[in-house]
Amino acid sequence: MSKQTAPDCNGAHAAGTYGRPGACHGLRVPALACVTLMLGWMPAKAAGNEVLGRHLSAECTACHQLSGQSVGGIPPIIGWPEDQFAAVLASYGRKERGGQVMQAITAKLSPDDMTALAAYFGAVSPKP
Amino acid sequence: MTPTRRDLVAASGAVLAAATLGMPAVLGQAKARVVVVGGGPGGATAAKYIARDGGGRIAVTLVEEHEVYQSCFHSNLYIGGFKSYEQLLHRYDALTAAYGITLARQRAARIERDRKNVVLADGTRLPYDRLVLSPGIDLKYDSVPGWSQDAEEIMPHGWKPGRQTLLIREKLDAVPDGGTIVMIAPPNPYRCPPGPYERASMFAHVLKSTGRTKARVVILDPKDSFSKQGVFMPDWEKRYGTMIEWLGPRVHDGIKSVDPAKGTVVTGFETYENCAFVNVIPAQMAGAVAREAGLAPAGGYCAIDPATMKSTVDPAVFVLGDACIAGDMPKSAFSANNQAKVAAMVACSELAGEPAFPARYFNTCWSLVAPDDAIKVGGRYEPRDGRIAATETFISQPGESDEVRRQTQAENLAWYEAISADIFT
Ligand SMILES: Cc1cc2nc3c(=O)[nH]c(=O)nc-3n(C[C@H](O)[C@H](O)[C@H](O)COP(=O)(O)OP(=O)(O)OC[C@H]3O[C@@H](n4cnc5c(N)ncnc54)[C@H](O)[C@@H]3O)c2cc1C
């Protein structure tokens, strides 16, 4: 059996590349979010644009259930403190957190997109 | 006379006014009307998101001929014994109840695009302001010489759900030790690029785990390469030794014919006689309702505007999922669901004045190679130069640790649960 290099299913030659270098330039954890991560507390405030967040969330809900149910390898993401949500997304964007899917998802999210997502998912409460 | 800047501003104001007037004309009725044909990942998702996000100003009718949706996605896991067939079934009750969607349980016979009607099988006409088509694929029965619709019971495809999927499993169970399964893979573009190779993996897994280690799977491919090939092939060797053999066109020199009665496959290179079973996955095209509406003038699939998912032929019609030409995006349930959300956003903006955002797309295709061993490929996409173009891509690597592969399969199973909920509830 011969071994060949893989074109991905779209014909884009992807092996070994996790996004273009520099694709996530300009993404920085907001200073506040860093503080939140360190201190572990922060009053929740709706800083992000929830309408934008709802739009962007369409990409997330193919894998993360809005019910808040945790299934297998994919964690629930609703009801998180907004600053922590945005900070975690930003760390995927910088590829500090591992995970090919999340790194690709976040590569083109601006800081505003991230806070919008944080606001949207933060306001979703689990179904009883 | 050259128009002044002022004229231009005035003119664009007029266009704007007309556009906004166009909206109340639609809003002048009790509600704007959206008809969706096809209740799969494309259509059902579009129906849900338009009904949910249309601010109560859009009446949505979903036209679907089957009472229960049977997913092709994860049907290979059924064939491999990792899921029951029942786990692939989805009803529409929750969707219609939760979002006030009207379900028309019928076949859409044809589209009258000039009058903006969908004509149902019983003759009922459903008028629409916007139409969403996501009818999936039809098979090109004449694409493999000697094969036909009559032969699909003997040489099944298993590329549309229901009896065909069950037949594949039945035939697999009947393969004797030492028997040969021949799979004829489809040419591009087709539903689920890694699907044939995941299925071959499942064949080998079932044969091996039932002690039929002398049986083999020969894949005859019209393509020179296939999705995730660089990961599939070393994995096959590691998991199944020489049970799976892949032959590209430079080796087999063309699939000349099949003989369903005799179970024979003839290629330019060699002939396979007395095959234990032959899985013919033929060439494909957009579902009939979209083709017959004149939305695929250049051939098999429907061209769309990448910024909106609207047909390039008719701006009142969105075409989603397997039926459309989505550039770098593969034909997958994930893609169809994702494209539906772009179409829903555009429809809600045009018909209900909801905010619009630039289109963005995402897809991941997982494939199970062996128990607890899955691989994936995916990417992010954006409209660029008139097509949906990949901006970031990722793919599993050969030789990843067992833990990574186990995690990838956990993700795959979780994805199925989440996307099913996203589509049908
Ligand atoms: C073996 C296999 C494995 C796969 N695995 C995966 C996977 O792991 N992940 C993944 O993302 N994708 C996978 N796919 C691909 C996935 O199944 C398709 O891409 C997806 O179903 C496309 O969705 P769709 O909405 O375009 O069409 P479909 O799912 O085909 O839905 C079309 C619907 O329209 C209805 N319909 C058609 N015409 C009419 C009409 N005229 N009137 C009324 N109703 C009509 C049909 O009954 C059907 O319910 C797999 C496919 C196969 C074959």
Image (tube, coloured by chain):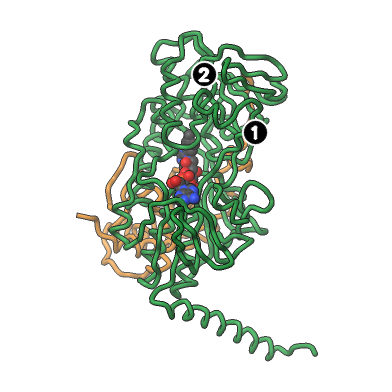
Chain colours: A orange, B green
Q: Which residue is drawn at 41% across and 35% down?
A: B162
Q: Which chain carries label 2?
A: B
Q: Tell me: is circle 2 under 8 Å from ligand 1.
A: no
Q: Is residue B248 placed above or below B114 in the rendered structure?
A: above
**In the current view of this chain or complex, which residue is farthest to the left?**
A128
* Label ID, residue B1: none
Judged from the image, the secondary structure of the residue bearing numbered disc 1 is loop
Q: Badge 2: how crowded within 10 Å, few (<14), some, or many (20+)? A: many
Q: Is residue B167 placed above or below B329 in the rendered structure?
A: above
Instruction: Say which of B312 and B334 sits in front.
Output: B312
Mark 1 touching mark 2, by CB under 8 A?
A: no
Q: Which residue is drawn at 35% across and 71% down?
A: B56
Q: Tell me: is circle 1 under 8 Å from ligand 1.
A: no
Is residue B374 among the parts visible in the rendering? yes
Look at label 2 and name its amino acid: Phe
Q: Which chain carries label 1?
A: B
Judged from the image, the secondary structure of the residue bearing numbered disc 2 is strand
Residues under labels 1 and 2: Cα distance? Answer: 19 Å
| Residue matched to label 2 | B277
Q: In this view, does B24 lie to the left or right of B250?
A: left
Instruction: Say which of A98 and B116 sits in front.
Output: B116
Q: In this view, does B296 lie to the left or right of A32?
A: right
Residue B300: % across, % down: 63, 46
**Badge 1 or badge 2: first in the primary sequence:** 1
Residue B43: % across, % down: 45, 54
The N terminus of chain B appears in which quarter of the rendering? bottom right
Is residue A115 among the parts visible in the rendering? no
